[in-house]
Each structure stands twice: as structure tokens, then as C-alpha cells.
Amino acid sequence: MLTPAEQYDRLPPETQRLLDEINFLAAELRDHLLLEQFYLALNALNARLQQLHPEIACVQGCSTCCQTQGNQWQLLPMEWSLIQRALQALPQAQQLRVQSQLQQLADPASGSSCPLLLDGRCAVYAFRPLDCRLKGYSFSQERLLPMQPALPQAFSCLAEQQRILHDLKRPGRALFYMFFPQREALQQVLQRIEPSDDQSQTLAHWLEQHFEALHSAA
Ligand code: SF4
């Protein structure tokens, strides 16, 4: 009588891959359903904002913020947990590139590009954290730039902020920005999904811990 592991070993590779994916997705649904529902709703919201404002430059493919601020985002443990699973599912060569880019961050001259940005694309795009999803599609109470200090500012790159400020001066355009979500309110949703003391850490910090653990286990 074969054990389940032995039966698995005898399956064709394509069937093994299918079973691996089903196993992975089932675990995702069990462990991350609420977070993923939230992300799906946010994707739908962003898609509609993009329809309302076709001039928003933050559609998939722009990596300006990833290149300039990406390693500074603060992630809660559950956000990191999703990214870590996606990272572990990447081909080994890509994982090594992420590790190498992380190590380069130690050199201040190398800039602050996100280590997960590979060839101008996010290697974990479908699993990216909240701030990456909000960039370009929310306003923030934080003073990101000393412009119009009495108003919330677009949570986006300088070019987008300036475009929106210019647009807001046009008659009737303010209405089109009233429905942008507020970043801080959506951050609170994460706290409702998984109430915890603030255990957020930078993406670079989580990645360092991840690769250190791999190194220790080897
Ligand atoms: S996680 Fe992805 S989307 Fe977010 S900053 Fe890094 S590369 Fe960009």
C-alpha cells in the first residue's frame, strides 16, 4: 500500500504541478481570504478610478514609485506573509536577484529601489502590499510635500501630484476627486481584518529576516 507521498511521487509532473497549485490556493483561501477579498475590492475600485481618470499614470507598468520609495513601505505581518509565499514560489534565479538587490540597498549610493522590482516589473504584483495598491489612487492626510498644506494630498509621485493640482484648478473638476479613498482610512481596514499592535516593518526589513532565516537553515 503506497503512502500519499509515494503516490504523489509517481504522478506525472503536470498533475503534481496542478496539485501543488490547488494546495497553495486552498491554503491561501483558508489563511488570507479576508485580506484577499479586501485587495480584490481595491483592485475593482482602482479600475473604476482609472476609468474615471484615464490620465492617471499609475497603471501597471509604471514603476516610478517602486524605484524611488519602494523599500520604505511599512508592511503588517499579514501583508508580508502573502508576499513571502509569492516570493517562495518564484524561480530560484529570481529569488537570488531579489536577494542581491536587497544587499545593494546597504550602499546608499545605490538608491532606494524596491528589491522586488525585476526588469521594471513587480515580481509579486498580484500580492503587493496596500501602499503599492494605493499609490496614485488615494489621497493622504500626511504632508508628503509642502504643497497646499490645507488640503489632503494625492498619495502619488510628484509628477502625478502636480498634474492633479493643475486639474483641480479647472472648473468642475473637484467633483471627480471626491471619491478617491483616503489612505489612512484604508490602512485602518487592515487593522480590522487582523487586529494587532502595530508590528509593521519596512519591506526591506521583512526581506532581510526572510533571507537570514534561509541562510541559517541551509
Ligand atoms: S512590492 Fe512591487 S509594487 Fe510594491 S514597491 Fe515593490 S516592486 Fe513596486
Image: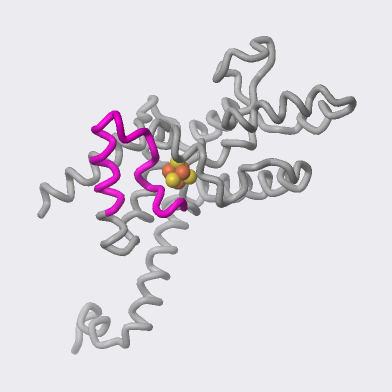
Instruction: Report the quarter where the N terminus lies.
Output: bottom left
Quadrant of the image occupied by residue 148: top right
Quadrant of the image occupied by residue 135: top right
Task: Please report the residue visible at 59 percent of the width from the left and 31 percent of the height from the top.
Answer: 156
Position of 10 with respect to 41 (left or right) is left
Position of 164 with respect to 9 (left or right) is right
In this view, the residue in front, 218 or 29, is 218
Vertical relation: 178 (above or below) 206: above
Q: Can you give x and y, in whole percent of width and height, for residue 78 in the image?
A: 40, 41
In this view, the residue in front, 7 or 56, is 56
Task: Please report the residue visible at 43 percent of the width from the left and 63 percent of the height from the top.
Answer: 26
The magenta stretch spans which residues?
97-121
99 is within the stretch colored magenta: yes
Vertical relation: 19 (above or below) 182: below
Name the residue at the right extreme: 171
Residue 48 visible here: yes
Quadrant of the image occupied by residue 114: top left
Q: Can you give x and y, in whole percent of width and height, for residue 30 in the image?
A: 44, 56
